[in-house]
Image: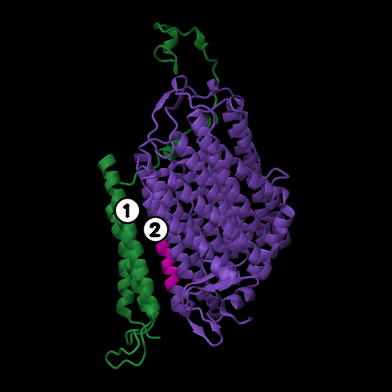
Chain colours: A purple, B green
Amino acid sequence: MTAPSVLMPLPVLIPMIGAALTMFAGRRPRLQRAIALAALCVVVAVCAALLYLTDRRGTLALHVGGWGQTESGMGPLGVTLVVDRLSALMLIVSSIVLLCVVFYAIGQGIRDGDERQPVSIFLPTYLVLSAGVCMAFLAGDLFNLFVGFEVLLSASFVLLTIGASKDRVRAGIAYVMVSMVSSMVFLFGIALVYAATGTLNLAELAVRLDGVSAGTRTAMFAVLLVAFGIKAAVFPLSTWLPDSYPTAPAPVTAVFAGLLTKVGVYAIIRTHSLLFPSGGLDPLLLVAALLTMLVGILGAIAQSDIKRLLSFTLVSHIGYMVFGIALSSQLGMSGAIYYVAHHIVVQTTLFLVVGLIERQAGASTMQRLGGLAAASPLLAFLFVVPALNLGGIPPFSGFIGKVALLEAGAQNGSVLAWLLVGGSVLTSLLTLYVIVRVWTKAFWRSREHAPEGHLAGATPLALLDESEDTQFVDRDQVGRMPIGMVVPTAALIAVGLTLTVMAGPIFRYAERAAEQVLDRGTYISAVLGGGQ
Amino acid sequence: MTTYLVPLILIGALTSAGVYLLLERNMTRMLLGLLLIGNAINLLILTVGSPSGNPPIRGRTSDGDTTTADPLAQGMILTAIVISMGIAAFVLALAYRSYRLTTEEEVTDDPEDARVSKLSADEAAALDVDRLRPESARDTDLPDELDALPGMEGSR
């Protein structure tokens, strides 16, 4: 038993055990909160240790249960968990985001929750979601990845429809159906891969797929790309996202926006680089990336509800990551990896801030908002830092990630790559336009100038969704922003700023991760034991 | 590896029926469509797994087969069946809730989507009130001429 073999299953095990314990503690909210917080704190520590170990010792693999042991080493017969630098980075960023968001949700529940809150369900489900996300990042075989997806999706169905109001049920139905179709397509892809190679272990697949004819390989990759494209919300498979995310409670939307689409992006990176490195579908991916960026951001311009607007920018910025992946170069992959980390943090922060706006001002649509900068300078500060970061203003991390991607595009030099460079710049400018629009409408103008500024939601609601409109002047005093909501938001902003200030070391880490991802040999020998 | 035609035709038929049902707006039919597609894929995994043979338990033989059947494909199918059963139960609960709320189980359009798509260019640009607003301080509790203006209906 070495340290890595003990640590590796923990990011899945601890949240799962935590979910069971919080279920038992359903009638004791304080105990439940303590368990959830403790579990996620431990996960952050474990992921930090894994990050350190992977960076020092290279890719780690664990054959759970020791199935398939032979004289030459471990064979890939059972469930395999693999951590390389990319997985470790995704794990640490996700676990920090998960911890901050659960802190926020607890803070919101303490302040605004009432006895009708479905808290006894919320925390266990949230922990199951955490386990599913970690499982997807740790998975060393295709079927385990599928199971990880299913675990996080089942949890997300419950979180999205929590309280089961009319709006949430409507959004939830569409979300469940689209997700299930994507899972079916994924399973179909798994069946095809299994038929062609007779294995599902990623490392063994990487070896055996080289012997499969190019046409068959492209067909399998295309099927898998459709499945991951739906999860990652790549145009034209992205239309479900802006309809379903905004209706959920603020912390749920935040964690969905930050993590769920990125799990899809991670799966695309893994399959693209490890299983199908020939790059046959790269032009298609580049075109999809361009359209994702442009269609997403044009959709954002049309919106007046800030949650929906941010959902559209989320779709749009997935395009940047796909752009970096599809370039198939070291620099492109480094840029994509850095951008994923940046985007998880920034997008989550923005949705948390919108939750604060909704609580303080009783609305999240620009038709009603106004005067927030004067009403709460702290809220304005909390909004403007991640917003400028998203817009890619130097020196923030969004700018650094975009510059790396643009450089990679220029390095590639093909017409399509230059088109994407142009599209990225345009999308970045339009993102800034959208952000400035929110800023001038919601923060700078007086609320009297908003078309429906006299209306507001009656009371702040934590997890439920039964808002009744009332006159803004008649609204109950909501008081100051709860400290339990401001602290996690500020902490995530600090993480975003760390990505900026520490950009040198972190980007070098992303470069090492990209190098490792593109070098299939290390992954294969770490799992199959050839090089030990 | 030999494959048999009948399961493949069955898989095709199940999938196409499933896709047809999935394109409906009625939730029960959509769920049935998903289940059909799920079964088609399970059958596909079974078909592509490996040829039939002895049960994958040490010491068991059947019909004098010389090879052993692939246990992995069966394991994956079992997992997929369990997952789709759980999700089907959730979808049924959701359909029932939707029926309770709206007395129908149709999947409706997104209202905010519909609103945004119907906006004209002028309306979409106009997030501000351009006209000068009357001073609300002058509005009294008594009925007066200000009450005729939009947004000022009723007394203060």
Name the chief secondary structure element in magenta. Answer: helix
Task: Give the residue type at disc 2.
Answer: Met
Question: Is A461 drawn above or below residue A389 in the view shown?
Answer: above
Mark 1 surroundings: few (<14), some (14-19) or many (≥20) residues within 10 A: many
Check the picture and name the quadrant holding the C terminus of chain B. top left
Give percent across and percent down for residue A342: 63, 51
* Residue bounds of the magenta highlight: A179-191
| Count of number-bearing discs | 2
Disc 2 and disc 1 in contact, CB within 8 angstroms: yes
- Subunit that carries the residue with mark 2: A
Give amino acid for label 1: Val
Front-most of residues A293 and A140? A140
In the depicted view, which residue is nearer to us: A62 or A209?
A62
At a point 30% along the width and 67% down the height, the residue shown is B14
- When the figure is inspected, residue A79 is found, relative to residue A262, above or below; the finding is below
For residue A291, say whether it is visible.
no
Q: Residue at x 32, y 54 (%)?
A: B90
Chain of residue at mark 1: B
Which of the 4 image quarters holds residue A464? top left
Q: Is residue A185 magenta?
A: yes
Residue A225 on image: x %, y %: 51, 63
On the image, numbered disc 2 is attached to which residue?
Answer: A180
Q: State the residue at coordinates (43%, 29%).
A: A459
Q: Is label 1 in a helix, a strand or a loop?
A: helix
For label 1, the residue is B91
Figure quadrant of residue B131: top right
Q: Is residue B111 above or below residue B141?
A: below
Q: Is residue B22 magenta?
A: no
Question: The N terminus of chain B is located in which quarter?
Answer: bottom left
Identify which residue is drawn at 31% across, 74% down.
Answer: B9
